[in-house]
Image (cartoon, rainbow, N blue to C red):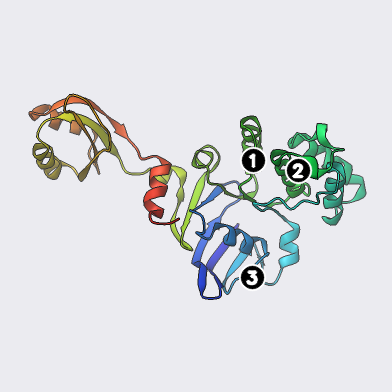
């Protein structure tokens, strides 16, 4: 289990990470989200030991990053957003070098390399200088180097950046497989990737955690979409009497119809139908509704660049 408690990091007078606390369990893939400059990369660098916090603690099981940094880093694979590669090396040389500095025994190194070559689909590029690779292949080489020592803790910052759709699908499947029995934290700007891969999500805004939930939990709260024609004051009275609230949906409809989102609380979709049926409002459509992750993200981080 990863425990982060009251973690703070400042750069001069700027607070990049502001007293954040969270936990990540093995087998639970956790997405770390936020707008640019929110503190995601700083948080990942703190977790990896690349940066030291001004205050707070980071624990992996019984080990603390402050006292046991070498032990923790030996169990950790960290892929930063900018791939850390030696451009003059061949792909095969780079993997061999990374395996050596990770202290993989000589008898195991070939086996580990072969596994990474297969996982990251590098067999056709082993004798090509890294400088000659496309951005997508460089990303795959970096990922192979990150995973070659079979880490228990995996931190990935934009792992699918620069990949084509087929490569993205392959890497997403790989991440799901890796996350089954490891601590895995994933940062991405692709919110559909979060929906596809992650079990839980932490959203950071201006250095503060503004959401820490399961992905399904972010969508909690039952709502109904309706498309109606009639006096909005009538709808307003119905909602005030029976349900939590409503908001006009930003959507252009023809024939004087308008659309709304009604928050249900403990009510059911059927209750909305029953109430509208008794009114003089003309109903074209009624259906369950949940906000997209994009909408939720925007609401939680609005006003940030």
Which mark sits nearer the N-terminus, 2 or 1?
Answer: 2
- In the image: residue 210, left or right of residue 94: left
* Quadrant assignment for the C terminus: bottom left
Q: Is residue 164 above or below residue 4?
A: above
Which quadrant of the figure has residue 138?
top right
Residue ID for mark 1: 162
What residue appears at the point 61 percent right and 58 percent down from the top-left corner? 44
Check residue 228 in the rendering and tell me which mark sits there, or answer none: none
Query: Around disc 1, counting alpha carbons within 10 Å, would you say few (fewer than 14), some (14 to 19), or many (20 or more)?
Result: some
Q: Position of residue 147 (x, y in %)?
A: 74, 47
- In the image: residue 141, left or right of residue 215: right
Residue ID for mark 3: 52
Q: Could you tell me which secondary element the residue under label 2 belongs to?
A: helix
Q: Is residue 169 above or below residue 295?
A: above
Mark 3 vs mark 1, foreground winner is: 1
User: Disc 2 and disc 1: Cα gap in Å?
Assistant: 12 Å
Check residue 141 in the rendering and tell me which mark sits there, or answer none: 2
What residue appears at the point 85 percent right and 47 percent down from the top-left corner? 89
Mark 2 vs mark 1, foreground winner is: 1
């Amino acid at each position: 289990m990863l425990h982060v408690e009251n973690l703070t990091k400042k750069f001069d007078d700027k607070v990049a990470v502001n007293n954040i606390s969270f936990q990540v369990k093995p087998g639970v893939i956790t997405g770390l989200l936020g707008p640019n400059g929110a503190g995601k990369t700083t948080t990942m660098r703190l977790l990896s030991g690349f940066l030291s916090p001004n205050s707070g603690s980071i624990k992996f099981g019984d080990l603390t990053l402050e006292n046991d940094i070498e032990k923790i880093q030996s169990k950790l694979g960290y892929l930063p957003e900018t791939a850390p590669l030696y451009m003059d090396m061949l792909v095969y040389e780079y993997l061999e070098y990374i395996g050596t500095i990770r202290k993989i025994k000589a008898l195991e190194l070939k086996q580990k390399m072969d596994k990474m070559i297969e996982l990251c689909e590098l067999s056709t590029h082993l004798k090509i200088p890294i400088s000659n690779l496309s951005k997508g292949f460089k990303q795959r080489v970096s990922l192979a180097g990150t995973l070659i020592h079979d880490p228990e803790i995996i931190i990935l910052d934009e792992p699918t950046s620069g990949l084509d759709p087929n490569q993205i699908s392959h890497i997403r499947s790989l991440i799901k497989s890796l996350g089954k029995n490891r601590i895995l934290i994933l940062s991405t700007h692709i919110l559909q990737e979060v929906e596809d891969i992650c079990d839980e999500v932490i959203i950071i805004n201006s250095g503060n955690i503004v959401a820490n939930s399961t992905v399904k939990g972010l969508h909690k709260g039952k709502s109904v979409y309706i498309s109606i024609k009639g006096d909005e004051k009538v709808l307003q009275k119905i909602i005030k009497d029976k349900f939590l609230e409503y908001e006009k949906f930003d959507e252009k409809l023809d024939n004087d119809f308008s659309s709304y989102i009604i928050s249900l609380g403990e009510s059911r979709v059927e209750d909305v139908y029953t109430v509208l049926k008794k009114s003089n409002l003309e109903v074209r459509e009624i259906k369950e509704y949940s906000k997209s992750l994009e909408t939720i993200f925007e609401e939680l981080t609005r006003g940030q660049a």
